[in-house]
Amino acid sequence: MFQLDTRIERDSILLTKLPLCQLRLQNDQRYPWLVLVPEAVDEHGQTVTEVHDLSERDASQLLKESNAVAEVLKKVTGCKKINIANLGNVVEQLHWHIVARNENDITWPGPIWGVGNAIPWDEKKRHQLVVSLLESLSQKGFKPSGN
């Protein structure tokens, strides 16, 4: 049975559910940072930890969703570069980070992990970003679902 890792739940905000993944916003306004978490389990009913553990159909759907989310994030933020990462060394549950990067962000051009402390989103800024993201995803055929 799918179970969201408590660290992902603690550090991010559910925006919507896509056909395969939860789409979450990392609660750190230093970067527009989304997290895709496939709601998938393996043949033993355990939450998936590796991309190759997904069925071919789910792996294809993950790529479709990540491409759409990355495209929308770039459009909405006007960022210079989209970073997509799947590490899993700290949180084993399969999840993809999709991060909008700019030359003026605090860690450019280096990685975002392990630098400074998260700055929680200002409610108004977060709301504006989320509305724009969900509207753009809807235009790509991904209708927001209950969260």
Image (spheres, rainbow, N blue to C red):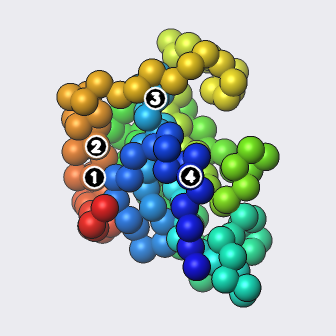
Residue 34 visible in the shown view:
no
Mark 3 or 2 closer to N-term? 3
Tell me the kind of residue under disc 1.
Answer: Leu
Tell me the kind of residue under disc 3.
Answer: Asp
Looking at the image, which is closer to me, 133 or 126?
126
Residue to which mark 1 is pinned: 134
45 vs 91: above or below:
below
Percent coordinates x, y for residue 110 in the rendering: 69, 21
Residue to which mark 2 is pinned: 130
User: Are the residues flagged by discs 1 and 3 in contact, CB closer than 8 Å?
Assistant: no
Mark 1 or 3 closer to N-term? 3
User: Are the residues flagged by discs 2 and 1 in contact, CB closer than 8 Å?
Assistant: yes
Q: Which residue is pictured at 27% across the width and 52% down the height?
A: 134
Q: Mark 1 Cα within 10 Å, few/some/many (few <14, many 20+)? A: some
Tell me the kind of residue under disc 2.
Answer: Val
Q: Mark 2 Cα within 10 Å, few/some/many (few <14, many 20+)? A: some
Q: CA distance from mark 4 to mark 1?
A: 24 Å
Residue to which mark 3 is pinned: 28
Numbered tag placed on residue 90 in the rendering: none
Q: CA distance from mark 3 to mark 4?
A: 17 Å
Of marks 1 and 3, the one in the foreground: 3
Looking at the image, which is closer to me, 119 or 76?
119
Percent coordinates x, y for residue 45 in the rendering: 67, 83
